[in-house]
Image (tube, rainbow, N blue to C red):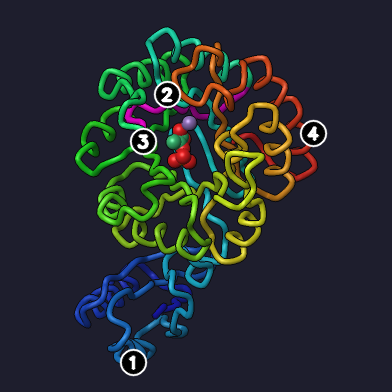
Amino acid sequence: MIIIMASAKQKDVDHVVERIEELGYKAHVIVGVERTVIAAIGDERGKHRLTALESLPHVERVVPILKPYKLAGREVKSESSVIECKSARIGGKHFCVMAGPCAVESREQIMESAAAVKEAGANILRGGAFKPRTSPYSFQGLEAEGLKYLREAGDAYDLPVVTEIMSEHQLPLLEEYSDMLQVGARNMQNFSLLRAVGKSTKPVLLKRGMMSTISEFLMSAEYVLSEGNPNVILCERGIRTFETETRNTLDIQAVPVVKRHSHLPIVIDPSHAAGQWDLVIPMARAAVAAGADGVIVEVHPNPEVAVSDGQQSLKPEVFKQMMNELKPLLAVMNRVAG
Ligand code: PEP
Ligand code: MN
């Protein structure tokens, strides 16, 4: 249920929150421009008891949330969320470019990558230190050492950093070194991991599972939000279809569909969707045109020698070209750099 309050003071809101909690529900306060909305989340069966709250001061209406995702949906928050990550903004007017190698391979490699993406205008540096690989014999990432290099590169070039968390046990380490926590496609329904990052204060970049529906995707975001972390950025990174020409199929429709249902920002990962570097620029252009809130792109100083995903990584000069090509499109779409 949602409790909609108009011209309410903090004490009025606190009072409603108290009553919601007394009834055994969790209260999530969403402060909007004109109204404050309090979502009461819990057992649906007792929800009629919440309707009595309509008699409290400044409570305008108590209405059920119809969608299965409560906090992620537009029913509780009609305006789009803008998420802040240090100097970067994602959502609303802000189009955020996250770029960097698939994996942190060495100090030099991440430093060079950071210099290149910063120069071209990226807003956030990416780089995996814990890599989810299909084969246990493939490079698994530099782990803690990689995190240190990533942090150093982010600090040297004044870029916030995003890196993947594969298990809740990694949370203390990742919180120390990263500005944003990436939950990968393979972990989109790792519910204990989602609950763990939901307790963090760091924004979460949640990638869509390669075989997940948009509704399941939003339910996973709901896990994070329900634990109290409101800063979730969704990422469409291609889904598995019968098509074999490309690594995955970019579901570009996911952008307007997610925006119809949710206030959360959504970015596109054209690198993992296409799996081929020469398809990245056209798909990044499509992302802007579809109304995405950003892109996350793999860039490597020397893709031929990359230990992972070299075939889909852009050389620095191609990334620069991508940024130049996006500029006029962003202006048409009325977007500003994140
Ligand atoms: C990645 O970003 O390097 C990655 C592994 O992505 P995904 O989880 O989308 O496959
Ligand atoms: Mn990759």
The residue at which mark 4 appears reads as: 328
Q: Residues within 10 Å of mark 2 (few under 14, many from 20)?
A: many
> In this picture, which residue range is highlighted in magenta?
121-133
Label 2 within 8 A of ligand 2 by Cβ: yes
Mark closest to the chain's N terminus, 1 or 4: 1
Label 1 within 8 A of ligand 1 by Cβ: no
SS of the residue under disc 2: loop
Mark closest to the chain's N terminus, 4 or 3: 3
The residue at which mark 1 appears reads as: 48
Magenta-span inclusion, residue 124 = yes
Q: Whole-percent x and y of residue 90? A: 54, 43
Instruction: Note whether 39 is above or below 241 in the view shown.
Output: below
Label 3 within 8 A of ligand 1 by Cβ: yes
The answer to whether the residue labelled 2 contacts the one labelled 4, judged by CB atoms less than 8 Å apart, is no
Mark-to-mark CA distance, 3 and 2:
10 Å
Residue at x-position 36% and y-position 32%: 135
Mark-to-mark CA distance, 1 and 4:
52 Å
Residue at x-position 56% and y-position 19%: 118
Amino acid type, mark 3: Pro
Q: Of discs 1 and 3, which sits in the foreground?
A: 3
The residue at which mark 3 appears reads as: 132
Front residue of 282/276: it is: 276
